[in-house]
Structures are given as C-alpha cells and as structure tokens.
Image (spheres, helix red, strand yellow):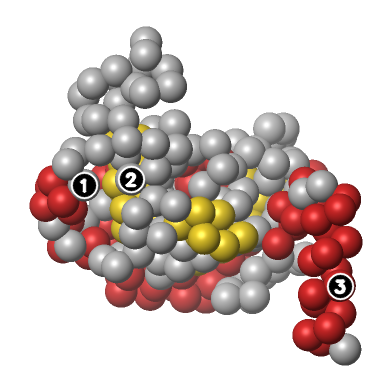
Amino acid sequence: MKLTNQDIIKQYNFVKSFHDKYLKKFAVAMPKLYDKNKHFTKNALVLVYLSFGYPKTKAVSKTELTKFMRQFYPDINDVQQARHLGAQDGWWIVAGGRDNIVIDVQRGSYQLYNLEEPYPSFKKGHRVEGIGDWQKLKEAYGLRCATCGSREGEPHFHWPATKTKLQKSHMDPNKPLKAGNVIPQCQKCNRADRNRWVYDEKGRVIKLAKPSFVKNFDKDVRRKILAILKKEFR
Ligand SMILES: [Zn+2]
C-alpha cells in the first residue's frame, strides 16, 4: 500500500477520534504523529497502517509492515512497534500465534482488533466503574477463583508453589469486559484456555467461544457435531 502524507495524517486523526472518545479514559497511549524533526513517529505509522479500513482491518505480516515502514525509515529492520502498541500502550492489537483472542491471526502477523476497548490485559485500563465494583465482585465469590476455587493471596490449589492472584476475566471472551461479563479467575484459569470457552457466572464452561477449537475434539465427537449441524443447516 502506497500512502501519501495526507493519507497518513487523515488516518491518524481518524484513530485519534476513537482514542479521544473511548481509549483515553483507560490511559491507552496515543503516539505523537511527529517527532521533533517533523518526521512521522514509528508508533504513529504502525498504528495508522494497522488501522486502515477500520472496523474491517486486515492481518498484516511483519514483512509487509517492515516494507511500509522503510518508505519512512529506510534502515529499519525489526519492527517491534506493533507488539509494543499492544502490550505496553494498551491498543487491542492481536499478535498472531501468541494470545489470539477473538480472531485468528497467523504467527508473525498483527491485526488491530478494536478501537473502542483497550487490550484485555491492559492493567492500567481496568476501570472499576466499567465492570462494577471489583472488590465487591471478588467478595461475592469469597475471594476465590470462580473456576478452580483457589483463594486470593493463598497457595494455588493445583500449583501450591504459586500464590493465587485473582484477575478480571471475561465470561464470554467474544464480548467486552464489562459488568455482567466479568468473573474473578486466578491467573492460571484466566490464561490457558480463556479464549476457547464461554463461562457462566459460576465459572463453569458452558459454550465454545472459538470455533476452530472444535478441531481438538475427538473424532467421534466431531462426527456427532457434524451430524447435528447438518441437520440444523441443511
Ligand atoms: Zn483458577
């Protein structure tokens, strides 16, 4: 994609309008458009590039991103900005292969998922009022993980050498982390498979959240699922 400076400025302002409206209050960092030499900053360029077509963004490979960045920084080799914008600055950029939530992105690619919510694990961004009173919610669960029952601050039930830390967890990972969609889970339950499942308020798995995970089911089960779906959608 060949972009003029005007295209970049326009797209930057488009992203900034979402930031002002939705992300600023979560302390998501909006990169500056220019550095002191009036060059576009690397962060701004990456954010602009990943946000094109929003809300219908595309997954962008590191190679493609590097090629784009070289129009402005000819010597750039390893473009780390996409990862930093997500993990450190709070933009919901899905890094392929690592912690795919909601969308499937290949390893080595990035996709901007959402400009209306911060990256799910962005700690600074978790406002108490957005999810209801977090302390009260934890107390309602007896300060225990809804799924495995491990107690906050105490040794983890399955990993006794690990101190349990309760985290705000999606009941349905396909929906925003808002009141009504939050359960406390320990760091273990909130990590391993949370993008696969929908939980109820008791922390029990009730649905499949990530369709591709059906591939991990036993063949016999997959056959039965196929039969059910055939019947429904024929
Ligand atoms: Zn747990």
Q: Which residue is mark 2?
A: 146
Cβ of disc 2 within 8 Å of ligand 1?
yes
Quick one: label 2, few (<14), some, or many (20+) residues within 10 Å? many
Helix, strand or loop under label 1? loop
Is 134 situated left or right of 71 in this image?
left
Image position, residue 180 (x, y; %): 29, 68
Quick one: label 1, few (<14), some, or many (20+) residues within 10 Å? some
Closest to the observer, 226 or 91: 226
Residue 16 vertical placement versus 82 (above, below): below
Q: Give the CA distance from mark 3 to mark 2.
A: 34 Å
Q: Which residue is mark 3?
A: 227
Residue name at image x 26 percent, y 66 percent: 179
Is 2 situated left or right of 156 in this image?
right
In the rendered image, the residue lying farthest to the bottom is: 234
Is 192 situated left or right of 210 in this image?
left
What is the total number of numbered labels drawn onto the structure image? 3
Cβ of disc 1 within 8 Å of ligand 1?
no
Residue 153 vertical placement versus 25 (above, below): above
Quick one: label 3, few (<14), some, or many (20+) residues within 10 Å? few
Image position, residue 137 (x, y; %): 18, 53
Q: Give the CA distance from mark 1 to mark 2.
A: 7 Å
Q: Residue 141 shows which numbered tag?
A: 1
Helix, strand or loop under label 3? helix
| Res. 93 in view | no
Q: Residue 223 shows which numbered tag?
A: none
Residue name at image x 17 percent, y 62 percent: 132
Residue type beneath disc 3: Ala
Image position, residue 210 (x, y; %): 65, 59
Residues under numbered marks 1 and 2 in contact, where contact means CB atoms less than 8 Å apart: yes
